[in-house]
Image (cartoon, rainbow, N blue to C red):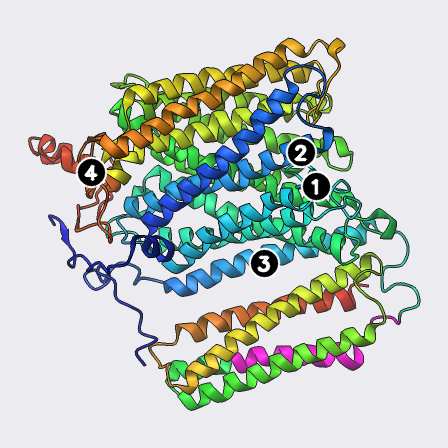
Amino acid sequence: MSAEARPVTAHASAEGSRAQVGMPTPLLGMLLFIASEVMFFGGLFAAYFNSRAAHVGEWGPPRGAPELEILPIALPITIILLSSSFTMQFAVWAIRRGDQSALKRWIGLTLVLGVAFLLGQLYDYSQLGFGISDGIFGTTFYTLTGFHGAHVFGGTVGLTILLARSLQGQFSARNHIAVEAISMYWHFVDVVWIALFTTLYFLR
Amino acid sequence: MATTTLAPRAETYRRSWILEWLTTVDHKKIGVMYIVNSFFFFFAAGILALVMRSELAVPGLQFLDERTYNQAFTMHGTIMIFLFVVPVLAGFANYIVPLQLGAPDMAFPRINALSFWLLPVGGLLILSGYLFGGAAAEGWTGYTPLSSAYAPGVGTDLWLIGLILVGTASILGSINFIATIFKMRAPGMTLFRMPIFVWTMLVTMTLILLATPVLTAGLIALFIDRNYGGSFFEPAAGGNPILWQHIFWFFGHPEVYIVILPAMGVVSEVLPVFSRKPLFGYRAFVFATIAIGLLSFSVWAHHMFTTGVVFLPFFSFMTALIAVPTGVKMFNWVATLFRGSISLTTPMLFALGFVSMFLIGGISGVMLAEPPIDFHLQDTYFIVAHLHYVFFGGSVMGVFAATYYWFPKMSGRRLNEGLGKIHFWLMFIGFNLAFFPMHMLGIQGMPRRIADYSPDAGWTLLNIISTVGAFMIAISILPLLVNVVATFINGERVGDDPWEGNTLEWATSSPPPPYNFDKLPPIRSERPVFDIRHKHDREHLTDEARLPAEAGES
């Protein structure tokens, strides 16, 4: 339990007013980090749309490779990632109630779904029939989906830590700021995928 | 309420000297390491500048060939901007911002240490190109296709990786500063009582937070092009080299304000103290800073007028518009000085140097915002003159003002004023000798980034003057170094508040204790230390006379 309790600095105890109003500092830190990530993906999306706007001829996978299809892989892994956002939120609601066993279940399930998404994406890569060096579409496709995948992987690392800590009973209704922060990040990664999925598969 | 009593000082945990500095998470020690580290890179990049100026003094290739010259100006620009000016100002902010807010430390002390330690690693990676067959040589802007897969050698790859690390350090630092400013303020320190330096850092850090990740995306895209066969910037495979310029300058123009805003903050701390007047128009200054921050995201393509693919009227108009809030600040500073009781100490001299030199840089900036002029002056020495008047005449003057102003806070000793004034005058004169002739050279058509020029071009005299100025700047650093060493050995101990400052950092001891404040004074204005010093002056006032000054306190 005590590991989650934040160390009390010389000042914090003497002044109830410092940093106790509004959003907790770690969550603000996570929100700011997400803001920087929005700009990072914004840069990559800008590169995608700039290349697309300047492109002559049909936009899509290079000649010889099959068209991008949402079945059999892209749509199912999208559903998997979307559901993982719900399971993550259930985990947050569980620990807000102080329900530790529900927290473990939902975090475990979220982690499984996240890993399933990554495996699905890797399998998808093996079936696409074009690579990062096959023209501008290949470059932007793999850069965007690859960096999104890397962020999902980072999320699964965070989820693993959350799972380990929840198995040790470190979270409670009052002390669970890490769960809140990781869930923010996980929702963000999910939103990026929604933008990416729409851009790559529907904005033809 | 008299003073806010705080818990007793945290007990110091004893460690060896080296281990203490390597593992510290104290914002003051980290701030000092930022500053020292930045000055090492400043000397390295300064030596490169001297090498370039020596090469350019007279026509002909004397010391370098074209390739090493290209590496020299690339490393000079990259190191000066990313590893000197930005981090040294972040270092002063690291030391001073928590003190000015009445906070015990930054919001995330361990992330603070991480953002510092990424800097020397990134900087050395960038420079290490010299060990592996040549450093990056495309200029600090790294334009494609100069930097794309056609440019062989790992120097450019090391440059990319180093910049990604330095950028990550900046992003982490910006998250930390913003969280600190919003969450760590002492009771009574409302947003509009924050010192101007804190305000400028808040806007600067917001710019870093939103602009740097875009550069990271571009650097990664270029790295993919160079190493994994990508074609972001490769026209033959459907890419677009101009895309790099868009991405780079979308970051690069906010970067210009990232570099100048903290220096503006320093100057706005120094001028009131040595004019013995409050800053004229505190709120106008704050809103002007925010306006500059917002506008800085809408002007990037003024670096790309000659590419022919940007909408000239919009970017020209927005660029000229930035002169308005900047002009507001000029009025703030001049009106602060007006009828003040001015004492020309060394920090004040550097602050006045900032105001005058930055004015010249600002005016040439507005000139360049006009496409007809810009088309003629693009990539000439006029640009070099302009950017040095902003970066050196502006930011670096601010850095030295901060150095002389806050040195007594960091060490308890004041730097020698005589040596400081020698430093200032040598640097001020040397700076103008080095960079003012470049305006004329640019108008006469001398292109930047060339290692040699024709003896018939008529540029020789101005180049010689410029080189003399560059060496004068280098010599001006010697009194500073002597001064710092001598002051540490046998400097004048000057107590906690030698300048009669206004802001909270002067309310604690010099140097401050590990957790900064044993007790905090009441904070009832943006000048809490001034209020304590003059509290007896106010006691004879009637209640009615006191009320306006204390309005808005509740």
Instruction: Pick whichever, A191 or B205, lies toward us.
Output: B205
Residue B456 at what x, y percent from top left?
Answer: 76, 9
Q: CA distance from mark 1 to mark 2?
A: 8 Å
Residue A8 in which image quadrant:
bottom left
Question: What secondary structure is marked by label 1?
Answer: helix
Write down the chain letter for disc 1.
B
Specify few, some or many for label 3: CA neighbours under 10 Å numbering under 14, 14-19, or 20 or more. Answer: some
- Residue B245, which numbered label? 1
Q: Residue beneath label 4, please?
A: B529
Specify few, some or many for label 1: CA neighbours under 10 Å numbering under 14, 14-19, or 20 or more. Answer: many
Q: Earlier in the sequence, mark 1 or mark 2?
A: 1
Q: CA distance from mark 2 to mark 4?
A: 44 Å
Mark 1–mark 2 contact, CB under 8 Å?
A: yes
Q: CA distance from mark 3 to mark 2?
A: 25 Å
Q: What is the residue that sits farthest to the right in this orientation?
A: A64
Q: Residue beneath label 2, please?
A: B303
Amino acid type at circle 4 is Val
Q: In the displayed structure, does residue B233 sit left or right of residue B62?
A: right
The residue sitting at 36% across, 33% down in the picture is B402
Residue B11 at what x, y percent from top left?
Answer: 19, 60
Q: CA distance from mark 4 to mark 3?
A: 41 Å
Residue B537 at what x, y percent from top left?
Answer: 10, 30
Q: Which region of the structure is painted magenta? A: A66-88
The residue sitting at 30% across, 35% down in the picture is B407
Q: Residue beneath label 3, please?
A: A38
Specify few, some or many for label 2: CA neighbours under 10 Å numbering under 14, 14-19, or 20 or more. Answer: many
| Residue B526 in sight | no
State yes or no: residue A80 in magenta: yes
State yes or no: residue B527 in magenta: no
Amino acid type at circle 2 is His
Specify few, some or many for label 4: CA neighbours under 10 Å numbering under 14, 14-19, or 20 or more. Answer: many
